[in-house]
Amino acid sequence: MEIEYLENRRGGRRVDTVDSFVYYKPLENSEVERERRLELKERIFGEKLSQLYRILDERGDKYKTDRDFIEGKIDKLAGLVHSFSDRQMQCVEMDGINISASGLRMRVRRPFLVGEQVDLFMVFLPRVDLLDCQCEVVRVTPCVGGSGEYYDVAVKFIVLDEEDRHKIIRYVQIIINGGPS
């Protein structure tokens, strides 16, 4: 299946999903979050990571690409561990998730303000793709349903790496094509 980047979000595909879990929390201070992730990375990998980087740096430019790749994967892993273990993360109502390559609509109990930034952690089943990102709230609609008051909150992705964007596109394509084979 060929994956096509969806530049025009209105022309792109968007699907309602029940096979994903989305956790969210307001992004209070990205500098504080960055420090927490760095601290966690140091606790998880410790001196071995510094030793690996030193060895690769000593070998020169030939291994710079490898070092950058490893560093990116380790940063991603530390970010996922941080998001997954964060007690402030709240789960989105499962029947209200709509996703595309450019953003997400979620049903939550907490009101947000347009322009507010949010940390998201997502789990896509059945592949168990995990990703975390930062979003900006673009629309908030108060609603009332059988289970009480809630808010439909639309967010656009503002920090999402290309690998994760392709995971979302692949997930949307799988849903459109009738589920995993």
Image (spheres, rainbow, N blue to C red):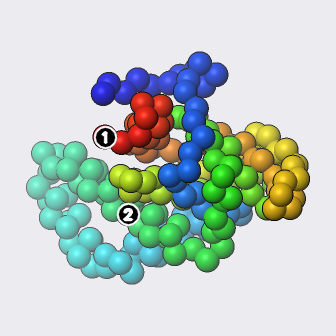
Q: Identify the amino acid type marked 1.
A: Ser
- Toward which corner of the image does residue 40 lie, by quadrant? bottom left
Is residue 79 shown left or right of residue 18?
left
Left or right for 159, reference 118: left
- Quadrant for the C terminus, please: top left
In the image, residue 92 lies at what x, y percent? Answer: 66, 59
Query: Mark 1 near mark 2, Cβ–Cβ under 8 Å?
Result: no
Reading the image, the residue beneath label 1 is: 181
Q: Is residue 68 above or below residue 47?
A: above
| Three-letter code, disc 2 | Leu
Residue designated by label 2: 77
Residue 109 in view, yes or no: yes
Circle 2 SS class: helix
In this rendered view, identify the residue nearer to me: 142 or 136: 142
Q: Is residue 169 visible in this depiction of the protein?
A: no
* Residue at x-position 84% and y-position 54%: 145
Q: Which of 15 and 120 is in front in this view?
A: 15
Image location (x, y in percent) of residue 30: 63, 60
**Could you tell whether 15 is left or right of 180 in the image?**
right
Q: Where is residue 59 in the image (x, y as percent from the top left)?
A: 11, 55
What crowding class fits label 2: few (fewer than 14 Cα within 10 Å), some (14-19), or many (20 or more)? some
Q: Position of residue 78 (x, y in %)?
A: 41, 67
Residue drawn at x 35%, y 52% is 127
